[in-house]
Image (cartoon, helix red, strand yellow):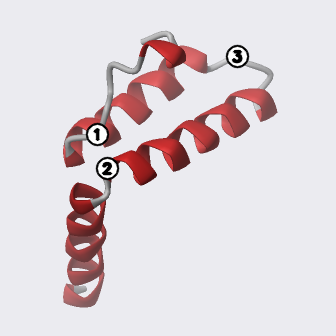
Amino acid sequence: MSGLGDLAAKAKKAAQEHPDQVDKAADKVQDFVQDHTGHRHDQQIDRGVDAAQRSYGGNADDPERGA
């Protein structure tokens, strides 16, 4: 299990070092998932993306996403 923990720590460190790039990717994933769920779960998806972005210091309050 420590291998998975190490991988998660490395991913978080990389996200903290490059938050703009990760924000762009998170926004693309958010749009994809919302489109493929027929926008039935937009609020839950928004909250999940915001929480993920807050975890690495990303832009959880991006006005383009309607947060």
Give the residue type at disc 2. Answer: Pro
Q: Which residue is mark 1?
A: 58
* Labelled pair 1, 2 in contact (Cβ < 8 Å): yes
**Could you tell me which secondary element the residue under label 2 belongs to?**
helix
Residue 11: image quadrant is bottom left
Up-down relation of residue 67 to residue 57 (above or below): above
Q: Indicate left or right for 1 with 64 as reference.
A: left
Q: Which residue is mark 2?
A: 19
Q: Residue at x 44, y 53 (%)?
A: 21
In this view, the residue in front, 45 or 24, is 24
Along the polypeptide, which appears first: circle 1 or circle 3?
A: 3
Along the polypeptide, which appears first: circle 3 or circle 2?
A: 2
**Could you tell me which secondary element the residue under label 3 belongs to?**
loop
In this view, the residue in front, 61 or 20, is 20
Residue 52: image quadrant is top left
Q: Position of residue 4 (x, y in %)?
A: 30, 81
